[in-house]
Image (cartoon, helix red, strand yellow):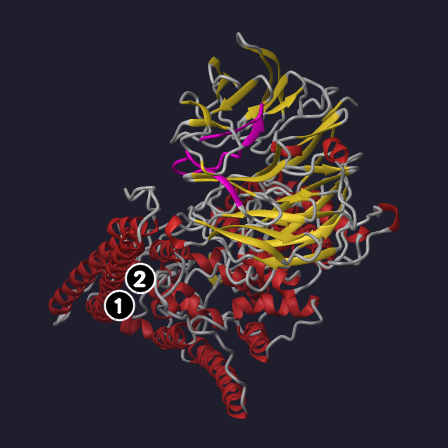
Amino acid sequence: MRHVFSKPTFYLFAIVLLAMIAGSAYGVERFPPPDFSDHQLPAGHTPERTTVWYYMHTAGVIFDIAMLTAMLAGATYFAHFRRSRRGLFVLAIVALAYFGFWREGCICAIGSIQNVSLALFDPDYAIPLLAVAFFVLPLVFTLFVGRTFCAAVCPLGAIQELVAVRSVKVPAWLDQTLGLFRYIYLGLGVALAATGTAFVICRYDPFVGFFRMSAGIDMLVFGGALILLGVFVGRPYCRYLCPYGAILSPLARLSKFRVRVTPDDCIGCRLCEDVCPYGAIRPPTVDQPPETRPAGRRRLAVLIVLLPLLVCGGAFVGSQLSESAAKLHPTVRLSERLSAERLGLVEGTDDASDAFRNTGRAESKLYEEAEQKRGQIRIATALFGGWVGLVIGIKLLQLSIRRRRTDYTADPSACFACGRCFKYCPNDPQSLVAFGETTEAGGAP
Amino acid sequence: MISPQKQPAPGYHSALACTIIAAIFCVAVCIILVVGYIERSANNPLESEQYAALKQQLFAKPADSGETNAIPSEEEIAAAQKRRQALKEEIRALDLRLRQEYFRQRSFAHMGGLLLLVGVVVLLTSARIVARLRPWIPMPEPSATPHDPEPQVQRAARWSIGLLGVLLVVSILVIAALLPAVRATIEDGVQLAAKTPESSNAQTTAKTETVTTKPENAPAAKADELKIDLSTYPTAEEIKKNWPRFRGPGGLGISAYENLPTTWDAVSGKSIVWKTPVPLPGHNSPVVWGDRVFLTGADKSRREIYAFDAKNGKIVWTYHAKGTPAGNAKPPEVHKDTGFAAPSIATDGRRLVAWFANGDVVCLDLNSKKLWERSLGIPENSYGHATSPLIHKNLVLLKFDQASAGDGKSKAMALDSSTGKTVWEKPRKVPNSWSTPIVINHGGREQFITTADPWVIAYSPTDGTELWRVECLSGDHGISPVFAAGMVQIGNEYCEWAAIKPDGKGDVTKTHIAWTAEDGLPDTVSPLANDEFLILMTAFGVITCYDIKTGKMLWEEDLEKEITSSPSFVGKNVYIFSKTKDGKCWVVEPTREACKRVSEASLGESCVTSPAFQDGRFYIRGQKNLFCIGNK
């Protein structure tokens, strides 16, 4: 495809991104307290939750939910009614400013997957209303109007949208393959969250370090690398890693109202396919010769038979991860540490073991709890493995089925409703603005 | 056709210039920030060489800073304190200056970050204006009609996903194989929890052994209980049969039994009757009474006393010493080679006394019932407290040397073994030392022999009266004396070895040193002596043998390994344990002519402690395990 910005702009963007990474680096430093003075470290305290605090907190929650709803409605309006790329772009900047930098990337719909997972499996966990709203509202909108949440509401999508200036087309087969990682990451995130092991999706949120101007150097590098990659590959996190996108994609296939490339009949100019940085425009299909059909049917049958085997095999392989995954769980890790200290496998104690001993709790109880957690993690990792097998199987099945298309259409599961294609469609009145006086009437090349 | 690029609109060049300037500005700020970050990371104020040197100077012992070892006068002490105060002020000033500089750099970086943010906003805005004023327009290449790449894409994607699946499986299996399982250790804990549901602070043991734990002061299980009569004292015969203190009866390191193996191997299990992991670390040596082997273990926050069943190595009970308020005030500073549990236990077969690095002295009966506990104050000891207690009749005798000689904090003391109350206490003008004292009986006179730089002082154990003293030591002193052939043998590497006749009164330096020696003087390892030989050993493995009566050097033998464990006599043989990772051991037989090597053995792990000998077997503590070695 052609680049939408000039060369100088592209290089400048790259430089700016590097600068952003470096600029955030100072935020990771921590300075040790004085160790050679009588300086008293101030004691930590939890602020008292007064009535005023409660009302303020509730108002904050309501405001966040209202903002999310309004932004989703706005994105829907710009994507479906106004068909305005500019409107979506401005909205994305607002989302980045509010949900990203102001709310420091928390709460977000992507992370809310873990809250919901934990709430489903741990009866003691009280899920915040805000997490429920952020999980459910984008799903509901997607079910009706496609991925308008990704278009202009998600701050992670917005930051990538800003930098997608010179996207190259990823080969479709590679795009399909890499897209599987979203589902694997989703499975892993749910498995670890449901067992209370870790919220890995939040921990490895690549952009939260920029939003908060503070992160470990590893996360800054990871986030910076993704942003740099995003200059050349449109929305790499959204397309290949976002676990929430893995939920939205199939829902978008079911959406009643989809983003349409053209407001009128497609004339097959291919401008939309060329301009889409996300490879979401599917060309019309051509009927295959009848002699190829039996082979296709056989392949489909074999894959259907293979599917349960893939699930079972995946479950077995996944269960092999249970010991490694258990190490991530704080209770298991603490019990392991205490055991190692007892056996003399490590020298001295660490903060966690000291803190545990200060609680006066019995170690035996901790071991029992750790054993119980390990059992849960064993089941979760087996289910995770089965999930991966299922995802691979379904994807293979999907790749063995041909759908007939007569026009250039946006694949609802891959389309982020960014609106780039709108103004380049010759059937859209905006195209006159885009092509100006050099465009002939009708705009067909 | 569509033109690929429109002619630039008015203002394009201005916007482009603005973009370039903003970009250059951003890059410059970025470089400054990165350089500043690297510089700050590399120059942590507290890692400043000047700062570290001053701190080292402050914490250095007087000997290290070139001061003499003689007892300082009051004027010298005052001058030293003044110097230290000045040094502290200098460090504080430097600390403040370094921190101020550091935070100045950080605020500079913060300002840079804000400037960068402004630069990025300007850059983004102007870049978009540039793009708007001269937009690029898509121009797809003509393609063959009809063109449907989907079948090829699907085929390639299927293969690619298949390959991904294989890679995932391999990756998961590799991760599972490479990461060490936690199962073993945790299962030990679970197993233990099942066996000791009443445990208030769980213990762990190796797979084949069992640990039982009782809460503090809880009565022992009937089956394990020993019958104890606290009103009696052990007879000399009882003491001889057991191993009641560091280096056994008299602190001599001489076994009463000769029916012991001369070869063993922990790896193959040869002559290893049992071995049991010791839960907490410690450099103390085992003591044995009857069927019980006692050890202590401690770390920064925990102190424990263990009783092992001598028959099978099971831990019969573990006593968790919660500590006195004074002992818990702050963790003592110890050197890693000393640790928090260097002193060995002392027992009289009725009670046992443990002394920890925080200055807490704990007395239990042999069933783990606490009899008394008291704090002597956290020792001011540059390497950490290591002197072991000893029990003599109704007294617990302690040599508590700490700080510098001029501080007046060192003392010798006797506690009532029944109550822990002080019976007598004598100040000692000596600095911190690490040797363990002995009690001898010479000519019917009992003497409590203590050693520290520069004095060997003998006290009456009953009332603390000083009997005699000899000035013959120098520098850091951790060698425990022995009494053999009628002479007290003592010395260390910074002075001459001295054989002292213990029948004098007052300062007998000039009159009661029978002989001196200069070769092969030890720095860590205590001497071994019988009526014929005196054997000295350096930490780098050189054995030097003297005629104990004349002080004539007989021979030298180089084992070429690091040794800090004190040697022991078993009959004519000397048992030696090394600090090497494989726990190399030697059995040698000293003769007047040479060192005859009898055998070599292996403990399988590093050893810095001394063995405790019993009938047919002996007990030795390695880095991790307590071993029972004997004829199976």
Using the image as rendered, state which of residue A237 and residue B364 is in the foreground: B364
Residue B422, image x and y in percent? 60, 57
A417 displayed left or right of B372? left
Q: Quadrant of the C terminus of chain B?
A: top right
Using the image as rendered, state which of residue A257 and residue B490 is in the foreground: B490
B399 displayed left or right of B354? left
Choose top left, top right, bottom left or bottom right for residue B261: top right
> In the rendered structure, which amino acid carries the disc numbered 1?
His
- Which residues lie in the magenta part? B466-491
The residue where tag 1 is placed is B110
B492 to A333, vertically: above or below = above
A61 to B50, vertically: above or below = below
User: Magenta includes B568?
Assistant: no
Using the image as rendered, state which of residue B564 and residue A185 is in the foreground: B564
A263 displayed left or right of B567? left
> In the rendered structure, which amino acid carries the disc numbered 2?
Tyr
Q: Residue at x 52, y 83 (%)?
A: A61
Question: Residue farthest to the right?
Answer: B223
The residue where tag 2 is placed is A26
Measured in 3D between alpha carbons, the distance from the residue under mark 2 to the one under mark 1, in whole angstroms, is 8 Å
Choose top left, top right, bottom left or bottom right for residue A373: bottom right
> Is residue A401 visible to the viewer in this orientation of the structure?
no
Q: Residue at x 26, y 64 (%)?
A: B96
The local crowd at label 2, few if under 14, some if 14 to 19, many if 20 or more residues have their Cα within 10 Å, is many
> Is residue B72 visible to the viewer in this orientation of the structure?
yes
Q: Chain of mark 2?
A: A
Residue B99, image x and y in percent? 27, 63
Instruction: Determine the secondary structure under disc 1.
Output: helix
